[in-house]
Amino acid sequence: ATPPPPKHIEKPFRDFGDVRVGMKVKVLSDATAVLQACRSTGIDKTYDEQRLSSLGQVVSIQSKDPSDYTVRCKVPELGSVWFAVWALTAVKLEEDLDLWGEDAGPQRPPSEPFATEWWSHMSGLAQGEAGAGEDGGAPQATAHDDRAVMMELEWEAAIERQLSEGAARRGTLGSTLFVRDEAADAEGNRKRTFIADAIIDAAMRFNRLPPPPPAGGP
């Protein structure tokens, strides 16, 4: 199958130190560029079929071989495949990662804080869309909505701060990508916690239960 066109200009890694074991990277979408890069490091044609099936995919680095600038990557549904480091490019967080920060997924529209069908459904459920209001009318906005907006704004600011501090502190692209990966992991944990809150909120609405008292309350 032909991979979809890239959503941004793909710039392959140039420095072997920019990648690390466990890091998520993306295989270039250009078949010629990928195969030429692999040939330049001495990788033969034996597993080219798997490499062509990996075009445009987000993969995880399993090991590195500094002697020839190659990395072994875990490709979803294919297993381990070796690539030249310059057959790979950095992952664009908002374009290439899904809600959990692991696999290729849809691009997030700028007008929505979390843009996946499932999250939109859960967000609506938390706001009472599944059962409407007490009188059957349209669901009303809740304090949960305000909290969602504030959490999203605060989190995006924190990620930007981490990226800036990481780049300034170490001054290398590899360090910046490392900080970004850490931010992505933390973002996944935060969203899972937020989804759990949404489920609890929806359950309380469905069962007509009052919310728990605030900390320190009666």
Image: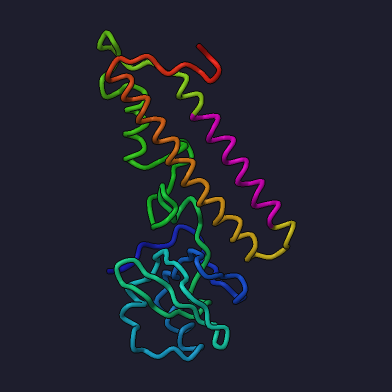
Pick whichever, 36 or 20, lies toward us: 20
- In reply to whether residue 79 is colored magenta, the answer given is no
Above or below residue 112? Residue 29 is below
- In reply to whether residue 151 is colored magenta, the answer given is yes
Give the main secondary structure, helix, strand or loop, of the magenta stretch: helix
Rendering coords of residue 152 (x, y %): 53, 35
Q: Residue at x 47, y 91 (%)?
A: 42
Q: In terms of image quadrants, where is residue 49?
A: bottom left
Q: Residue at x 56, y 72 (%)?
A: 13
Q: Residue at x 51, y 88 (%)?
A: 41
On screen, residue 177 versus residue 77, left or right, reads right
On screen, residue 20 versus residue 129, left or right, reads right
Rendering coords of residue 6 (x, y %): 43, 62
Q: In terms of image quadrants, where is residue 127?
A: top left
Q: Residue at x 39, y 78 (%)?
A: 81
Rendering coords of residue 179 (x, y %): 61, 56
**Colour logic:** rainbow
Boundaries of the magenta span? 148-166
Rendering coords of residue 211 (x, y %): 41, 17
Q: In terms of image quadrants, where is residue 150?
A: top right
On screen, residue 155 versus residue 161, left or right, reads left
Which quadrant is home to the N terminus? bottom left
- Number of labelled discs? 0
